[in-house]
Amino acid sequence: MSELVTGEAVALELRPARLPSRALAVLLDLVVAVAVYVAVTIAIVVSTASLDEAAQTALSIATFVLVLVGGPIAVETLSHGRSLGKMACGLRVVRDDGGPIRFRHALVRGLIGVIEILMTFGVVACIASFVSARGRRLGDVFAGTLVVRERIPVARTGFVPPPPPWLAGRFSGLDLSAVPDGLWLAVRQYLTRMQQLDPQVGWSMAERLASDLAERTGAPVPQGVPPAAYLAAVVHERQAREARRAFGSGSASSAAPAAETAPGAAAAPATEGASAAGAAPAGYVPPVGPSGTASEPSGAAVASSGGGRPAESQHEMPAGDRPGTGFVPPA
């Protein structure tokens, strides 16, 4: 793993490609380029049989330059560093700061590649890549580029530890819309590596990240909550919201409007039986028993018989308005 630092002092962890994978990618690119070159040469020879020898030589040189030199340069420029061989091997050419390459980078790499790959049969490129700490050949050194691996095993990614149980759901009311993606990435990287840091350094980093996160959310860090635990709890809340947004929560979203339609309705937690039976319609008022409490409908009672308690009434009526029959007509 190689750590590159950008102009904004952001550390980028890139995995440089080594000699075997790069050699395989170059070999695949050469096979494709030579096949195209042979096909184009045959077509030109057949179509220009009537020309003299000087014209045919000039066309052959132009074909060599355009196909074996200009072709790879154009492909790397248009694909931002991903030729056919590199795509097959999961490699990519990037700048030293981790950004995508441009035409001038591909041009320098292509022109020097003619000397160190084509004319020397790859000997110079292999020696330079073997000696370099990042596996760079001469074209990469002069162009300021680096070949990195794009496909990294998923098992090597860091694990974000869960928050303490006593903090689960405590930050459900935070406004996380103003937190930028860069801050989320920094918090996630800290949580995945906080066990590898020095305790004092890790604590100062956690305090700084917690301060930045609290400034974005508009709510201070609660007293007595360690900064690392606060970061883990907020990240867990964000992941929970993304999961609800992705998979949906039909019962909670449908029950919320029904509770808002009844003026003065007291909010009661939904039980397992009530959620299994489904949300009641907005105009439905449950029957009121002789004792003044709402009796559960038959469907909800059957659903709650598996261990859930009957749902309490969310609609209270004055005692003088209750009919003596024990039934309140729908609103």
Image (cartoon, rainbow, N blue to C red):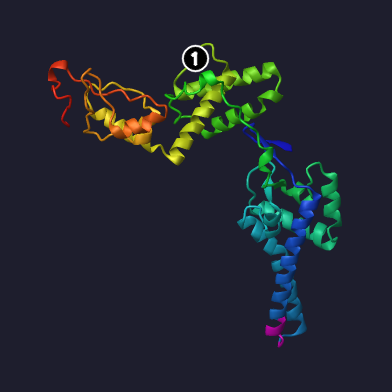
Q: Does the magenta stretch include residue 104?
A: no
- Where residue 19 sits: x, y (%)? 80, 50
Front-most of 38 and 20?
20
- The residue pinned by badge 1 equals 222
Asked whether the viewer can see residue 248, the reply is: yes
- Where residue 45 sits: x, y (%)? 72, 82
Residue at image location 76% in from the left, 58% down from the top = 26
Residue at image location 17% in from the left, 27% down from the top = 327
Q: In which quarter of the image is the N terminus?
A: top right
Q: Is residue 49 magenta?
A: yes
Residue 230 position (above or below residue 157)? above
Residue range (magenta) = 45-50
Tell me the amino acid under the disc marked 1.
Answer: Pro
- Where residue 73 sits: x, y (%)? 68, 59
Seen in the image, is 125 located left or right of residue 3? right
Front-most of 194 and 29?
194
